Each structure stands twice: as structure tokens, then as C-alpha cells.
Image: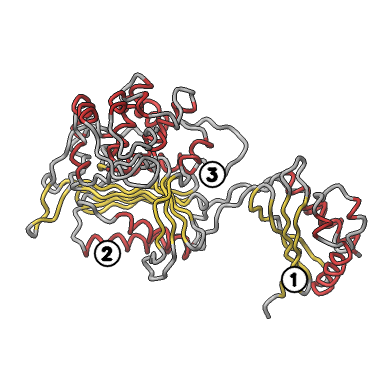
Amino acid sequence: MYKKIIQLFICSFITVFVQAQSVNINSNAWKSVIKETDQLFTDFATKNNQPGYIYGIVANGKLVHLKTSGMANREMGNPVKPGSVFRIASMSKSFAGVAILQLRDQGKLQLDEPAQLYIPELSDIQYPTTDAPPITIRHLLTHAAGFPEDNPWGDRQLDISEDSMHAMFKRGISFSTSPGTAYEYSNMGFAMLGAIIKKVSGMSYQEYIEEYIWKPLGMHHTYWEYSAVPDSTLAIGYRWLNSSWEAQPMEHDGAYGIMGGILTTAEDFSRYMNFMLSAWPARNGSDNSPLQRSSLREMQQPWNFAGLNPNYKYPDGRICPTAAGYGYGLRWSKDCEGRITVGHSGGLPGFGSNWTILPEYGIGIVSFINQTYAPATTLNIQSLDLLVKKAELQPRAVPPSPILLQRQQELTALLPDWKNAEQSSIFAENFFFDYQVDSLRKEAKSVFQAAGKILRSSPIIAENNLRGTFTLHGEKADLNVYFTLSPEQPAKIQAYRIRLEPREK
């Protein structure tokens, strides 16, 4: 009997790699929750008398939904359209991260080099303590340079000239903390990154980012200077003052623009979001995007701890503690349900914006609102939460490695008798010190008997390259099998567990 079962297992385990799951955007649940998300934005705009907004959802490498409402320019009577160009404020910061990593990958700089190598004025600054380390490029990327939080002062620096900016650096910098000891949001730090990009590449940061990021991604309606945007597509920013909407002055491009000056369309920015999502999962195959996938994933890691919110509350009211970090121009968070978000918000006089992706799910959302500091982040998080919950989305599967599939097949062939297991070469040297064969055999026969005839096996669910779980489906119950492999080469089974899972009646 067991011989036939083993043959069934072996056949079922001749498996190719599991590909990343696609989001079913044609399901009734998906269509229903999209309508609910549309209504969420509509209700918010109505309640707050918003001038205008646009939001889009990306999935499966595409922009799959786009909704517009209201006016881009009230004075000219221009409605918000798919091609409307909004200023995205601090959503600009991650472009500095991409540019710096491109130059790093080319061997032109190192992240842990002192920034003063590229900005000479920093050589003479007075640090807050005598034991402070020099500011590094990594410090600047992760808001760890010790500079004070500089909103809203930084908002008014967009059009500062390079000469004025460097003169300011030369006069000295006020520190709130010693470099490398804390997270504190700094627009000045990203302005310095713009100067470093110019020093290393020989091009202004504007020219560099346009040439090596925007053009390759097809972002042909993205700008640094608002006066270059056609009046018919430019969204004007507004603030509610004295019971009416008042247009806010637009700042020109300047040395600080890299921290928050980009203007773009939702369609263009969706290309950038899909570029970010394309890094996941780690895999074989061609890697020819503007930044290699490993560096994109590096950007999206929490390099500087930003805080813990034990009382974070989702818009539906459930409390879910959340940890936050900062990557390279990117915000990162992980909640109590294990859900990871990556993205950035943006706020300037006249504008509020946010983009957020769920790397493990392969989806994301972007929203632009032409209202001062509009809470786009809250709307986006609520929308993604609705999508995950109500469309019953699942994280993208981790492709099982060849060795994980091989060990799954070899382990299953030994069940339930564990015959000649100790002579097998598939177990790490610790295994039979930690597990007794007689006990393993007794346990396996007991649960196999309770499960009844084994009918089929589910594909392995890989946690990573060396750890996974699979299920043997019996007539009366299921058997859940977990194992993990050692770090040696070839990797061998170092831990194992089998568990009976009775079916609900």
C-alpha cells in the first residue's frame, strides 16, 4: 500500500518552479471592492470640498484602475484628467535613492563614504559632540545625519540656487542629534544627495534622473520645472482659507528640488511603482531595468528604525501594532498581521500625495490631491486594506528552490516507516541526535493511520529557499509536514515536524 502511495508522491513532486501569483482583477470581489474604493475617495472629496484628485491602482505590472475627480485648475476651468500633472512633493525622494545606487553599482561611490568627500563645505562643520562620526551618504539616504526635522522650512527652499545652498552649508549646520544615532526627517539631507549626484556624475541631478530613470521607464510627462508643464495639464495647488479655496504660489525648480520638486502624472508614476514592484520576488532571469533588482530590494529595506506604534488603528477600527523604518528615500512598515508596506507621502503648500505598494502582494496605489497637506496616506492605506481583505488577496508565492523540492520528495519517500533513514544522506548531522528514529516511526504511523489513505499532496509552500511546509491529504484528515534545511552545501534536513489536522465536520 505504502509503496503505491510513495509512487504517487514522487510523481506529484516532479514540479517546476512556482511562478509569482497574479492578482485576479477580473473577479467579482475585485470589481466590487474597486467600486467601494472609488466611493471612499468620492465621499472624502465631498466631505472636505476638495478641489480635485486622481488615484490609480497597479497590479500585475500594469495600471489597472484610474479615477479622477474635480478641478485641476479652478480659475481656468480645467478638470482633473488622466494626464493632469501634479506636484508630488516628498514622493520625489526615492528617485535620489535610485540615482545614488546606480552610481554605487557602477563603482563611482560607496554608501559609507563621508559625504564631505563630495561636498567640501562639510569638512569644516562643527558636530554636536567631539565623538560624532562624519556624515556618510547612507546617513543622508536614511535620515540619520543628525539634522533636525525641517518641515515646513524645507518646503520653502525648493528654488534655492546652488551657490546659496553651498554658502548655507559653509556657514554651518545645526544638529539635533549626533550622526548615526536617530531617525529624524531631513529635507536638507536629500538636497545634499542632489549635490553628490552632480559631483559624481558630472550632470545636474535633474539631468541625471531624467536621462537614467525617467526616460528608461517611459516617464515622458514628468518634470522638474512647473513652467515647463502645459497650462492645460498643470494642476494648481489650493488651500482652504477664509471659506474659499485660495491658489498657492508655485515654486520654481532649484537646488532643493530633489527632496520634493517633481511634477508628474499618475500614469507616469504608475510606471515607477511597477518598477519598484518588479524587484519581487528574488528570482533568476534577465535583470535589465534602470536599477538591478537586488539594489531595488536593498532600497526597500528598513535601514533606520523610525518608530513603533503599539496603538496603530486601521480605518476599520481594528488595532494593529506597527513598526516603521526608513530605507533609501522610502518609508517601510510592518504591521501585526505581517503585512509590509513600502512607499512615501508628499506634502507641500497646495498638494498632498502618497504612493504605497505591498511588495508581497504585487499591488500598489498612488493618489494626488491638489489640497495643502491632504491626507492621501490615510486614503491609500484604507484602500489597500479593503483590497486585501475584501478581494481576498494572498501574498505572492515564494518559488521553491530545487533543493527544497528534492528534500521534500526524499523525505516523503521515507514516510511513515523511516526505513533506513539513518543511512540516508539527506539529513544533517544533528538530526538523529535531536530525533529518535523509533519515536519518529511511531508518530508517523499513528498520524498516517488517523488520516487514512493518502489521496494527494499539495505543492510545497516555501517560506524561503531552505524552509517550507506541505500537506498530505488523506481520506479522513490531513497531515501537515514542515522541514528546514541546514546552511551547508548541499543543504540537508535539520528539523522536521508532522502534524495531524482533522477536518471540520
- Label 1: which residue? 500
Q: Which residue corresponds to the image point at 16% horizontal and 50% vertical from the top-left?
A: 238
Q: Nearer the viewer, mark 3 or mark 2?
A: 3
- Residue closer to the observer: 323 or 175: 175
Tell me where residue 225 sits by quadrant.
top left
User: What distance separates the C-alpha of mark 1 from that of mark 3?
Assistant: 33 Å
**112 or 353: nearer the viewer:** 112
**Element marked by disc 2:** helix
Q: In this image, 26 relative to 157: left or right?
A: right
Question: SS class of the residue under badge 3?
Answer: loop
Q: Position of residue 100 (x, y in %)?
A: 41, 31
Residue lying furthest top = 202
| Residue at which label 2 appears | 43
**Which mark sits nearer the N-terminus, 3 or 2?**
2
Q: Position of residue 378 (x, y in %)?
A: 33, 59
- The mark lying in front, picked from 2 and 1, is 1
* Badge 1 element: strand
Is residue 36 in sight in this rendering?
Answer: yes
x and y, in percent, of residue 53 in the image: 26, 52
At x 48%, y 38%, the residue is 296
Quadrant of the frame with the N terminus? bottom right
Q: Is residue 64 visible?
A: no
CA–CA distance in space, label 3 to label 2: 34 Å
